[in-house]
Every structure is written in structure tokens, then in C-alpha cells.
Amino acid sequence: MKELKKEDINQEVFDLYDAYAHNKLDRRNFIEKLSAYAVGGVTVAALMSAMMPNYEDTRTIKSDDPRLTSDFITYDSPKGGGTIKGLLSIPQGTTGKVPGVVVVHENRGLNPYIEDVGRRTAVDGFISLAPDALTPLGGYPGNDDEGRAMQSKLDRNSMLEDFIAAYEYLKNHPNCTGEVGVVGFCFGGWIANMMAVRIPDLGAAVPYYGGQPSAEEAVQIKAPLMLHFASLDERVNAGWPAYEEVLQENGVEYQAFMYPDVNHGFHNNTTPRYDEAAAALSWERTVGFFKVHLQG
């Protein structure tokens, strides 16, 4: 099977994958539509293989990295799913308490990519908690297709309560200063926006290509925001102008960055949507933002 590189993949294929990944297309229709791009020796199987995440070769921080301790814990979410599992990562080699960051997964549960982001966050100096909102259904099942199907069965407002409870857990953790922020990706970007709506003393929120709250919800935001967008992500970007207008009218501190010529999911280094330059720059900005607003 021919191994496809990112530059070999038509933009329309990325758009189809986006629709598939967000439950706009089922697997059968996704495969059928991919067949139109199976030309010149490129097979549908090769296209499918290229678009699916590679978790084996993309981990950046090992679970036993000496710079952190990283273990699964459970915490209570009385307004959400009950008892929720999450990956708690604590930086080592620091003295005293450090700020916390809730790391919110995409629409498929706590997969290896988000676990890795949680560990990266700890290496950058924050105690992080990456919850698995699929816990009430048994947790992330080991592959994204099943995870996405599972998550579609859960109420997103109930899942929001799980992440708000994660904020409370971190805020009261003995290793945490009590200053807590959130970073989220895709579905997690919406969660990050909504945590800013719901939590008056949230330290900072960083949504990556996340859906926006309503105007009525957005007026409640007090936390500083840093928002990352992909220029090719028409679906999410369509809601940004109205959201920005509310933020401006209410004097909310925010920074917004539009990364040119990249797709939704550009931070996710396990799929060909990944853009190394945009991912690195956005993460550098994110860490700096958290240091300003959480470390003081």
C-alpha cells in the first residue's frame, strides 16, 4: 500500500474527514465519498490509513518521564457523571505549589494524544488533570471511532459538569496554588469556552478551534481568553465574529490567533491535519499565557 504524505492529500479529503470526525458523515458514507479521490494508484484503504491517528509513533512525553509523575485518579462529579477517571500529572523538581490546568479532550474521550498533552502541560510547570468524559460508559475504548460513537450518547452539559468538577479538584489539590486554567481542543474548545462562562474565578481559558457560547452566555465571562483558530476551519470560524463582538462589548481580556493554511485539529500530532509550525507556536503562546495569568 502506498504511504501517503500530507502534501499528497487533497484538501477535500481533509474536509470529508472533518465531517466524519464530527458525526456529519457515517463511516460508510465517508468511505464512499473517499472513493472519488482514489486515483493514480492511491486506494481508498491508503486514504483511510493516512487519515486515521497514529498513536504509536507520536508520543512526546513518556509516562515514566523523570520530570513528572503521571497516574490515573478518580474524582467526584456529583452534577455530572458521578465518579470520573482522569490522568493527573505533577511536575517534579519544583519547590512549593504550582498552578493547575484542566486538559479537555476532543469528541472521542481521553485518547493517547490528550494524555500526552496532559503530560506536556506538567513538564511545562503546571499540575494537569485530563479527565475522561467517557468514564460513565466505561472510558475511552482504545480507538477513536468507538470513542466518538460513545461520546455522542452523552449529554454535553453533563460532560461540562465533569470538567467543572475537575477544576474544583485541581483547585483544592495540595500541590496546587488554587489558580487553575483550562485548555481544550475541538469539543474541548467548547468546554473551555463554557468553563469561562460558568466559573467566575477561572484563571484563564485557552480554546483550540472550539465552538462558541451563545451571546447570552458569553456576557458572563470574566476569565482572560486565548483563542486559537485554523484558517481552513470554516465550520468553527463562522461563529467567531459574533463571539468576538460580545467579548469586546463587555471588556473581556482576550487574544485570538488565526493560523494560516491549516486545518481544524492542527495541534493534534497524530493525524495529517497536524501542522508542526502552527502547533509549536500556539503551544508556546498557550504556556506563556498560563504563566502570566496563573503564576502571576
Image (tube, rainbow, N blue to C red):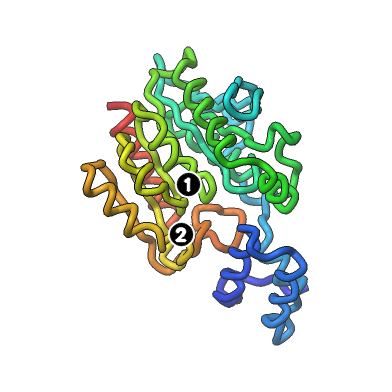
- Of residue 143 and residue 137, the one placed in the foreground of this image is 137
Numbered circle sitting on residue 274: none
Type of residue at label 2?
A: Val
At 42% from the left and 50% from the top, the residue drawn is 212
Whether pointer 2 and pointer 1 mark residues with C-beta atoms closer than 8 Å, the reply is: yes
For label 2, the residue is 236
Does 73 sit above or below residue 63?
above
Does 185 sit above or below residue 122?
below
Badge 2 density bin: few <14, some 14–19, many ≥20, Cα 10 Å: some
Determine the image quadrant of residue 199.
Answer: top left
User: Disc 2 to disc 1, how far (Cα)?
Assistant: 10 Å
Q: Position of residue 127 (x, y in %)?
A: 48, 26
- Of residue 277 and residue 28, the one placed in the foreground of this image is 28
At 58% from the left and 69% from the top, the residue drawn is 14
Q: Position of residue 91 (x, y in %)?
A: 49, 25
In the rendered structure, the answer to whether residue 294 lies left or right of residue 62 reads left
At 35% from the left and 48% from the top, the residue drawn is 215
